[in-house]
Amino acid sequence: MFKKYSKSTFVIIIFLLILVILAYKNQNFLIKKGYQISPNTMHKVRFFYFNLPHNFPSIPSNNPVESDLKFKRSLKNLVFKNSKSKELKIFDEIKKIQFYMPKENYLLSGISNKYAGSSYIEFFNNELFLMSSRGLMAHGEITNNGIILKQIENNLNLFLEKNEFERDTTYSFKDILIHEQKVYVTFTDEVTKNCWSVSVLQSDIDYSYLNFKYLFKSNECIEEKNEEAFVPIQSGGRIVSVDQKNLLLSIGDFRVRKKAQDLSSIFGKIININLENQEKTVVSIGHRNPQGLHVDKKNNILLSTDHGPRGGDEINLINLKDIANNNILNFGWPIASYGEHYAKKNAITEEQIRKVNLLYQKYPLKKSHEDHGFIEPIHYFTPSIGISEIVGFGSSEYMSSSLGGKKLFFFKLDEKNKIKKYHIENIGERVRDIVFKNNKLIFFLEDTASIAVVNF
């Protein structure tokens, strides 16, 4: 029966089988090269690579934004099944990290990647709350068998909708916080036509309908066409509570670097928003793209993470007394950084080199912060890991997640708030958000739009 097949056919079949085996064993095999040829195609290939073993119900849509918005309108449940587990080292202990893969009605639209969906998470009243980057809101309990999240109808797409998402997927909802019976949401906001900022919405908790209104909206915005650049993914947008009356909001510089050192600007800052009078005050300046905030009331500190340029991701520390006393701290960007401008690596022609030299004259990226009057990070990463959220989970024990690096950074602080011990673990996926509540460390993983849980 094999005679009708030529020798070359068998060779091709064997070659294809080898490719499948190698790709399954190593997620980076061929995919990195493929991105150089066709990024959109390879996003879909990567999506299938991650998810084929988990029996996704259908082929991803060619329009993930429309797919997610259609799913939101349907008000169907998000269903995740208990899929697999593996060991995770956390200092001297070995914990089990349990993965919950999408089973029904999965999210597709990502912020940085076309596939799969990006989301942010919160924990309230023993339930997990999820907000997708496109404005879907859902809640439900985490069980051993799986997670079923019931959608909550809302009006978020009155503030950011399909046209903006399809113009640029990095226009998105940025974070969710539940505080004092209210839900707070941050997002990239087109304040005026083609001019963007980061705003905050609020709604009373209502499981039948969330009716959001503005809490904070600045008149200042970044024009899409300006003398420097416009990179909306570099916008920050993390929000946390300090106490009953005050919230902290991180705002990136949108790559208009000069804004970070301008005290009259909100960009490149961490700001405080007073919930009683909606007044804003600047907490710290000299930030590029602050992606993580964690308030540790026991140790009276705020930890923040900041995306560096090419290299130079940072973990920074602010004493809460400085916030209470209105002491504005300066973390140096874009004068000081342990990274380098992106343009430096690719500068080949004389004109490109000339432009890079001019960029460094304006924004020199000095390697010492302290020597130039700025606050040093308590840790920096070169090369970058694509640092994201940061949480505390023990006595002076913390963890920061990453996007591009697909790693977790665990560290401990001593009595002087210096890092005394740390280690890095590979999680194998981009981690968009993390929360630690009720002795659970919960992750949203955006390569597979899945959830992972570590029980303590």
Image (spheres, grey):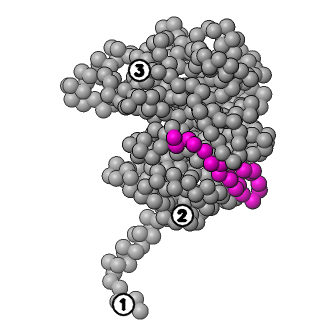
- Amino acid on which disc 2 is placed: Leu
Q: Earlier in the sequence, mark 3 or mark 1?
A: 1
The residue that mark 3 highlights is 257
Q: Residue furthest bottom?
A: 1
Q: Earlier in the sequence, mark 2 or mark 1?
A: 1
Q: Please state which of residues 338 and 248 is positioned toward the viewer in this rendering.
A: 248
| SS assignment at label 2 | helix
Q: Earlier in the sequence, mark 2 or mark 3?
A: 2
Left or right of 68 in this view: 145: right
What segment carries the magenta color?
A: 139-158
Q: Is residue 155 magenta?
A: yes
Mark 3: few/some/many CA within 10 Å (<14, 14-19, 20+)? many
- Alpha carbons under labels 2 and 1: distance apart: 33 Å
| Disc 3 and disc 1 in contact, CB within 8 angstroms | no
- Amino acid on which disc 1 is placed: Lys
Mark 2: few/some/many CA within 10 Å (<14, 14-19, 20+)? few
Left or right of 351 in this view: 441: right
Q: In percent of the image, x 54 and y 12: which residue is there? A: 330
The residue that mark 1 highlights is 3
Q: Please state which of residues 258 and 410 is positioned toward the viewer in this rendering.
A: 258
| SS assignment at label 3 | helix
The residue that mark 2 highlights is 52
* Residue 392 seen from this side: yes
Q: Quadrant of residue 193?
A: top left
Placement of the C terminus among the 4 image quadrants: top right
- Amino acid on which disc 3 is placed: Arg
- Alpha carbons under labels 2 and 3: distance apart: 42 Å
